[in-house]
Amino acid sequence: MANPNPMLSKEQLPRAACLLDDAGAIVTWNKNCERMFGISPADILNRAVSGLLTETSAAVFTNHWRALGAHSEPLELQLELATPGAARTVELTLEPQADAAGHYTGCVAVSCLLAPPSDSEVIGGMPLRSVVDVLPGTFYVLREDGTFVLWNKAVEAVTGLSHAELARANAVDMYDITEKRKIAEKIRLVFERGDDVVEANLLDKEGHATPYLLTGARIDCKGQYYLLGMGLDISLRHRQEQQLRLRERALHAASNGIVITGCQGRDNPIEYVNPAFERITGYRLEEVRGRDSRFMAAPGMDAEARQLLRRAIDERYQVNVTLRNQRKNGEVFWNDLTITPVADEKGRFTHFIGVITDVTALKQRTALLEHEVHHDALTGLANRTLLWDRLDQAIHMAQRNKSLVATVLMDLNGFKKINDTLGHEAGDEVLTVVANRLSSSVRDSDTVARLSGDEFVLVLVNQPSLRFTLRMVERLRQCMTRPVVFDRTEIEVSAAIGVSVYPHDGTTTFDLVRAADIAMYHAKGTRGSEVHFFSPEMTTTREAKQQFEHNMRRAISHEELFLLYQPKMSLRSGRICGFEALLRWNSPEQGVLLPAAFLPEAEENGMIVQFGDVVLRHSCAFLQRIAAAGYGDLSVSVNVSQREFCSPHYAQQVNDILARYRIAPSSLDVEVREADLVRNHHRGAIVLGELSELGVLRSVDGFGEGASDLNYLQKLPLSHVKLSKVAVHQICADTRRGPMAKSLIDIGHNLNLEVIADCVETRAQMEFLKSNSCDEMQGIYFKEPLGADAAEQLLTSASRA
């Protein structure tokens, strides 16, 4: 074989010798061997010498070794080493050895490198091996079959393979099974086309992957092609790319709109918007790129906020503003916008990042909540809170302008009757229509408020004169005279109207409303759409009314109320069958008052509910008393007002008091006037049904007093009807005829009800009722109302007779 370096003779080439046993294993390894091959004795002794050779050369060596024992002549072979470093060829001379008996024992192997390092393999005085080890990535030379010819220490470090393991390794096996085909194809392309680049995950011996950028180039050496490759660890780049992808996904997933603009003078062209921006504004990225965001501004709106935004952009500082923009479809939306300037690595501001939050719904909810806080839910008018504020502002304005302020308080007449007869839906419709009429009858600067229930208050500002106020109030009165149509029914509407004027009738909001209320109270006495302006004399009447209400409250707390009991007689047996409880008030100022003197006022101010509670408790105490005396089969009837009857949980209240006094429910008879039942059909049926379930007796009082709705009455769970006073008093003593009473008795019996005659005053009335099968009677003909003691004595006397 020709010497590749003609400057060296064969004798001058480096040599090394070792001893092999008869199996070809290395027995000795001297210093020259260690220097030549770079392998220590500990790593090589007892290993086959073929392990130092490439696969092809190892096969050649094995074929010659088998025949070596049969020859005594030395054998010379040129073989290729598989040791690290440059590809090298060694001339191996094998000298057979025999023992004293002539048996073959092995051979001496003398090696001579035919391709020692040349001048070209030294760079700056450093061997090429040292140079490739300091390269920043992996460096390797591959054969076409993917085995390694040369590699640097970085390959060993990243793969975790030893020198010997790499010598036997294949580059394709160092990649995941999913990438092996790709790597094999890339190696093939390098040998075919000359170069290529690929990214792949390089596996270490434990299976851990490291992403690498691999480059390969084909080189020609002595007519044979090799792949010269390098690899760079791109883990950091992958992590950075993952972070960028994550940030990009975050931008795309964000619910807030994000816009990135440049910094170019007064204009800041849009470079990027995220999908949320597109969804909020309706504009796609292609439509806004290169445009300044100001093109979306809502014209003529939020000038102050835009000025603040412009200053922050010019001076490069962060700012947060709330303003209105326009979507692509022209719709205006509220936009909470935060603008932040962004600087590059040199500190120069290059971009602005804007974060957009669509707060339109929040603004609308806030406005709605503010409206609900200050306005009536049913009518949309100002409520009490806003009324006081508007009236206070009107007074301050009147002080500056030296003008008048009129406070108008209106209370609808008969509104309770509308609710009772037609239902609350009709009442709500009346309130809504009245509210609209009042709002349409005043100026925008005036205020219309719903104070409570069916009370309205108007604040008429900047009144130049009382004549002007009179005209406005008359317009308000006129708008109340037209009926309200509900469910094809015309409902007549009227109101009592009271007016107070600043500064004549008061200088504070409280004084003006109080004065208007007093005037309205006087107007209400007329029961029509009357207007009363406040005068000082009205205060006296109002104070008297308030004092009377105070006395009624005192009557309860000081136990000034008491009951009388009027006996009821059975017309069949002639015996006492029960009592009716009648309320009286022992007033310290006026003496004993009959119900007509105070119950209408109590009904109006609501005290009737507390009075009814007193009647119910005293009646149950009386029932308890007579039951203990042996008259537990008698009943006591109590009159219940419409306001009591319609109060929530009335039946439960009755049940609780019966339980407290341990009274049988059948001992109590609840009397409700027929007119009250007719006014509220639905509520009447519910409460009478609840009382029926308790076992309490149920009576209709004043039967025949008005137009009876017999179809309605026959559906109610009643036990008794009580003839009206008018029907009883029409019984004629001379002719002994009473057609109205007779008809009502027949009707009551046809409804399967017990019939009671009230206010019987003569013998003729009693005999007529008895002859026409009336069941019970009460009145002064039989007995006057008695106190509890006298009533019990009457029972005792009657039982002895």
Image (spheres, rainbow, N blue to C red):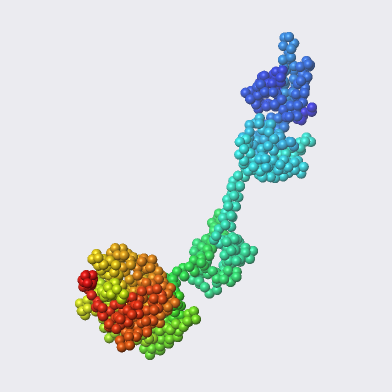
Q: Nearer the viewer, residue 525 or 191?
A: 525
Q: Quadrant of residue 753?
A: bottom left
Q: Is residue 611 visible?
A: no
Q: Is residue 482 left or right of residue 286?
A: left
Looking at the image, is 697 positioned above or below residue 459? above
Residue 132 position, x and y percent, is: 66, 37
Q: Nearer the viewer, residue 577 or 187?
A: 577
Q: Quadrant of residue 483?
A: bottom left
Q: Is residue 320 visible?
A: yes
Q: Quadrant of residue 150?
A: top right
**Could you tell me which quadrant the C terminus lies in?**
bottom left
Looking at the image, is 333 positioned above or below residue 523? above
Residue 353 position, x and y percent, is: 55, 60
**Could you tell me which quadrant the N terminus lies in?**
top right
Q: Name which residue lies at 68% across and 21% down.
A: 26
Q: Name which residue lies at 24% across and 74% down.
A: 564
Residue 300 position, x and y percent, is: 53, 74
Q: Nearer the viewer, residue 402 or 148?
A: 402
Looking at the image, is 200 positioned above or below residue 597? above
Q: Name which residue lies at 34% across and 77% down.
A: 774
Q: Is residue 253 left or right of residue 434?
A: right
View extreme (bottom): residue: 467
